[in-house]
Image (cartoon, rainbow, N blue to C red):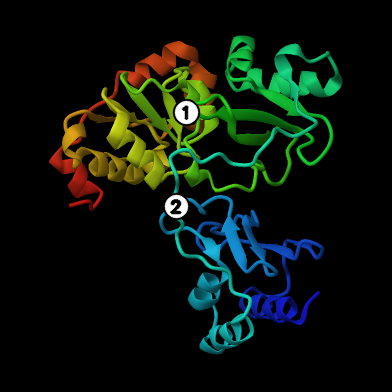
Amino acid sequence: MSDVSLEVLNIVYNIFGSDCRKHNTNKKQISFDCPVCDEGRHKSNLEINYGKLLMKCWKCGEDPDGLKGSLRKIVKTYGMKRDLQLYDSITEDFRPDFTKKGYTENYKPNIKLPKEYIHLATAKTTYQSEKALNYLLKRGLTKEDIKRWDIGYCEAGEYSGRVIIPSYDKDGDLNFFVARSYVGHKMAYKNPEIEKTEVIINHLSINWDSTIFIVEGMFDMMGLGLDNTIPLLGKVLHPKLLDALVKHAKGNIVICLDPDATRNAYKIYRQLQHIPRLYGKIRVIDIPDHVIVNDKPVNLDIAKVRELYGQRGVIKILRRARTLELQDYIEYGLL
């Protein structure tokens, strides 16, 4: 371990203590409970790479106020003044450039599906393939959905025990994939290390002349059951997608985020509604916060609606699409 990374690790210990949740010394990566979103649940979602001087929370990292990016942000926000001074002095020659890089419309990420990827629709029956299939069926998907969305899984390798959901660009080339654990990994999602804000998820399926739906994740896209759906893989509309909507969208745009992201959905609505060529074409769907199942509250998102109530339940949710009113802006402090 270099002297610089060791000194940075000591600063991290000064801030969070040495009782970390997980520590990979080879990758110089260490995990702690996120000070922004953990709230005593001890999920250890905050990962810090003290070699690359990067950090990310796997829960709130895509939120506007979440933790993602330069490790200096954490040192400045949660450390003492002397921690920041020491950090700046020892990383002066090693600090990465965190300036925002512009995207290119025809950007092609260097990405491949895991070599262990097996398409579930054509997989031989094994203990693992059955387990992966049952996981998807329990989430309300069908065998037709699995074939339609090209879903596979891995029995070995880095993505072992995960279903793989690919995304393709407008030319049919792979531009991202989501790997979701079906065996209870501590980190539910493990995605490729590329900048997802540089790609449009599910771009191949998008017809810009028709109504476009914007959701949070891949399971929300599949739960909605509509080709013309773009997952944000978060709660924020990134510049490349915004640019594509402004240039190409001719129909309505319907925003359908999780109940805990209502304010984010309304902010996206306002952002798009203020664009002259999109004015009057924006809708939002408010999903109920929860339902009672077997006398217990169950949190809802569009994927859970599909799981509990099937496509008929999803259709009922789609009928809730509406325009916002002044009171909505006032209630969520968006004026």
Q: In the rendering, at what x and y percent does residue 291 appear?
A: 45, 28
Direction from residue 2 to residue 85 in the image, left or right: left
Residue at 55%, 80% (x, y): give it. 79
Question: Which element carries disc 2, helix, strand or loop?
Answer: loop
Residue 243 spot, x, y in % from top left: 33, 41
Residue 137 against residue 2 in the figure, above or below: above
* Residues at marks 1 and 2, CA–CA distance in whole angstroms: 23 Å
Name the spot of residue 179 as percent of width and height, x first. 66, 35
The image quarter in which residue 3 lies: bottom right
Amino acid at pointer 2: Asp
> Amino acid type of disc 1?
His
Query: Is residue 69 or residue 205 the one in the foreground?
Result: 205
**Residue shown at the point (76%, 38%) measured from the top left:** 159
Displayed quadrant of residue 259 = top left
Using residue 318 as the reference point, say whether residue 180 is left or right of it. Answer: right
Any part of residue 168 in sight: yes
**Image mark for residue 203:** 1
CB contact under 8 Å: marks 1 and 2: no
Q: Secondary structure at mark 1?
A: helix
First in sequence, mark 1 or 2: give its number.
Answer: 2
Residue at the spot x=76%, y=28% of the render? 117
**Residue 289: numbered disc:** none
Q: Is residue 2 above or below residue 201?
A: below
Q: Which residue is found at the position 60% from the left and 62% from the top?
A: 55
The residue at the far left in this view is 326
Percent x, y for residue 91?
62, 80
Q: Residues within 10 Å of mark 2 (few under 14, many from 20)?
A: some
Q: What residue sits right under mark 2 in the picture?
A: 63
Place residue 210 in its image quadrant: top left
Locate the N terminus and report the quarter of the image it occupies. Answer: bottom right
Is 335 positioned to the left or the right of 58 in the image? left
> In the figure, is residue 145 to the left or right of 316?
right
